[in-house]
Amino acid sequence: MVNFQPATLDRVFAALADPTRRALLERLEREEALSISDLARPLPISLPAVMKHLDVLEGAGLIARRKQGRTVTCRLTAAPMEDAMGWLARYQRFWTESLDRLAQFVEAPK
Amino acid sequence: MVNFQPATLDRVFAALADPTRRALLERLEREEALSISDLARPLPISLPAVMKHLDVLEGAGLIARRKQGRTVTCRLTAAPMEDAMGWLARYQRFWTESLDRLAQFVEAPK
């Protein structure tokens, strides 16, 4: 059995429970590195609010920030998501089984 | 692209961010249906505290409760986890790629 770090899972799942934080991660999935002002630009919230969300993401190990001159750049560090997905994967049989049962039902001779 | 219901994802990830709630789901993964008192027995928290966690899980659509006579039975309803896993799956290439790079590094001719 895989041993998950409970505190890490707590922080990762809590970080993912907010749509703004998921939107920030989605942007960093598409673009390798972005400055905080680039990340903040399309969002309808203040820069300090964006900074707070970035703090939560960094606390969960999901992003890394680096200062380059006067610009702070953010990158995705997706590794902690692997544990979260591993935790969810054990439940996969529940929805796979129901799809299998549906397939059997649909394909059954009439 | 898959469209996720943001509010559902918020509730599912928030529900999973607590170790007691994950422990409740883990028990319901192993045993098909359990009464609330069976679920509460091994936990070091009060019955009302367990009930509050079950409310959160039910609000996220992760469990269903049914009254049978004087007993309330809980079952896992894992379907909303599929969306959560689908959301995480798009980041899978990040940790797969780093493992591939590690493998290349380890297997490289010396």
Image (tube, coloured by chain):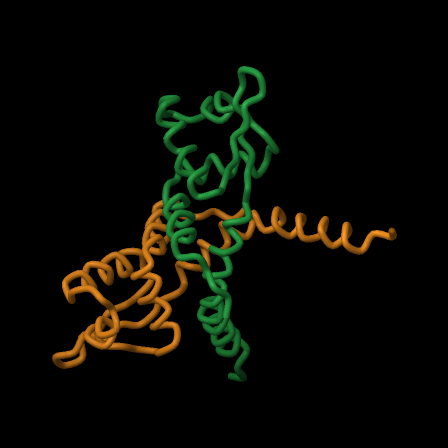
Chain colours: A orange, B green
Q: Residue furthest bottom?
A: B109
Left or right: residue A92 versus residue B37 is right
In this view, the residue farthest toward the left is A70
Image quadrant where residue A19 sits: bottom left
Q: How many marks?
A: 0
- Give the residue at x 60% y 32%: B31
Residue at point 72%, 48% (across, down): A101
Whole-percent x, y for residue A26 in the image: 37, 69
Q: Nearer the viewer, residue B23 or B1?
A: B1
Position of A64 relative to A13 (above/below): below
| Residue A101, above or below A74 | above
Q: Residue furthest top?
A: B70
Query: From this viewpoint, which residue is outermost toward the front?
Result: A110
**Residue B46 percent location from the top left of the image:** 36, 22
Query: Could you tell me which residue is drawn at 47 percent across and 64 percent down?
Result: B3
List x then y, in percent, for residue A62.
33, 62
Dividing the picture into quadrants, the one containing residue B45 is top left
Using residue A65 as the reference point, say whether residue A98 is left or right of it. right
Quadrant position of residue B16 = top left
Residue toward you, B103 or B85: B85
Residue at the spot 66% in from the left edge and 48% down from the top edge: A98
* Location of residue B37 in the rendering, given as x and y in whole percent from the top left corner: 48, 21
